[in-house]
Structures are given as C-alpha cells and as structure tokens.
Amino acid sequence: MNEIASGFVNQHFSPPIVQAIINSDMEQLQVRDQVIRFDKDRTRRAYSSMKGGDAERCGCCYCRNFATQRSTAYPEVFRSLLDQLGIDAEKEGEVYESGPEGSLRMYGGWLYFAGEFVRAGERMSDTGSGFQYWFADAKNLPKPEADFGPIVLAVEFWTRLPWVIPDQPYSTLSRSPDRPSTTAA
C-alpha cells in the first residue's frame, strides 16, 4: 500500500493540487491532472555533472537578462517542486525569449529530470502569478547535456520578466551576434 510522503501544495488553489506518494521503485507525484514517477537521486547525480545552465552556455543578451533574474523568476512553489524532483534550478536545459508583451519579455524553457508519465493530463499549472509550468516528454526536446537515464521528462515553464540588464534587446533591423548583417559592406 502506498503512503503519502509529503504534500506539495500550491496555496493559490483549493483543494490541494499536488501530492507525492512513495512506491517501491520511484516516487510518484501528481500536479493537477498530470501524474509522474521520478527518480530524485538519479536526477541529482545528472545535475551534479553539469557545469551550468543553458542561459550561461548561450550568453546572448536575452539569456543574460534571464540569468540575472533567475533567483526571482521562479516562484517559490515552483522552486519547491524542482527541489522535490531533484532538479538544480540554476541549470535549465533550455531558456528562450519570445518577444515583448507590453513592458515585459516573454520567456520559456525547461529543466530535465529522470522520470516517466503515469498520466500525461492536460499539462498546465499556474502559480497564480502568471508563471505557468507543466510536465513534458523529453523525447520531443533536444537531448539533455547530462545522462538522466533511459526515461527522461522535463518540467517546462512560461513567464514574463522585465528587461533589467544594460544591453538592449536586439532589434530586427540591427545586427546581433546571432544575426549577420543584411546590408552590403
């Protein structure tokens, strides 16, 4: 018989939307209608072999803007979930910027972990602050830098952040390190 190990509860929703259950192989977790099994120890070992996250590997102004705010970009409820899964919040597998929305910039990304779906569900949870996250099959994402084992999932996220670094976002008309000039020299 399974027993409840800990309750990961988002205070913005009632009744509680998340509950962790221990079984003989891996821990099981339900977030809204998604149910996963995960291996926290294997995930921690994989993250310990990584030097940094995608934002540091890339280094473009969009990733630097994200990395500068990483400590506040993830709400506490999401950081607690990452810790429960064994994920190092400083080492995302991917971060991307999707343009402005008013005075903010849209950001998405994901973090890998050793795990599998029990039930894929509808895939969206909101922390109540506009930060959204869901579990996704890593088979549909680029191969992770570290070895998470034969079964890998990701927790994807979507958020809005202000522009806080001195470098300005690239304009579609300007030259950037990622985009060659379109004008003849």
Image (spheres, helix red, strand yellow):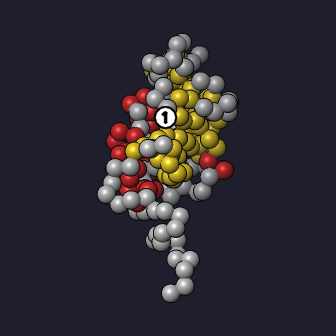
Q: Quadrant of residue 137?
A: top right
Secondary structure found at label 1: loop
Q: Residue at x 63, y 33 (%)?
A: 123
Residue 153 location in percent, x, y? Answer: 59, 43
Residue 95 location in percent, x, y? Answer: 49, 52
Q: Is residue 81 above or below residue 89?
A: above
Q: Does residue 64 appear left or right of residue 93 in this picture?
A: left
Residue at the farthest left position: 166
In the foreground, 50 or 149: 50
Q: Residue at x 64, y 25 (%)?
A: 33
Q: Does residue 32 appear left or right of residue 67 in this picture?
A: right
Residue at the farthest bottom position: 185
Residue 121 location in percent, x, y? Answer: 68, 30
Q: Residue at x 47, y 72 (%)?
A: 175
In the foreground, 122 or 88: 122
Q: Is residue 123 above or below residue 49?
A: above
Identify the image quadrant of the N terminus. top right
Residue 43 visible, this angle: no
Q: Quadrant of residue 82?
A: top left
Q: Quadrant of residue 51?
A: bottom left
Callout 1 amino acid: Phe
Residue 161 location in percent, x, y? Answer: 42, 43
In the foreground, 73 or 183: 183
Q: How many marks?
A: 1
Q: Residue at x 56, y 29 (%)?
A: 125
Alpha-carbon neighbours of circle 1 within 10 Å: few (<14), some, or many (≥20)? some
Q: Does residue 163 appear left or right of residue 125 in this picture?
A: left
Residue 129 visible, this angle: yes
Q: What residue sits right under mark 1 in the picture?
A: 131
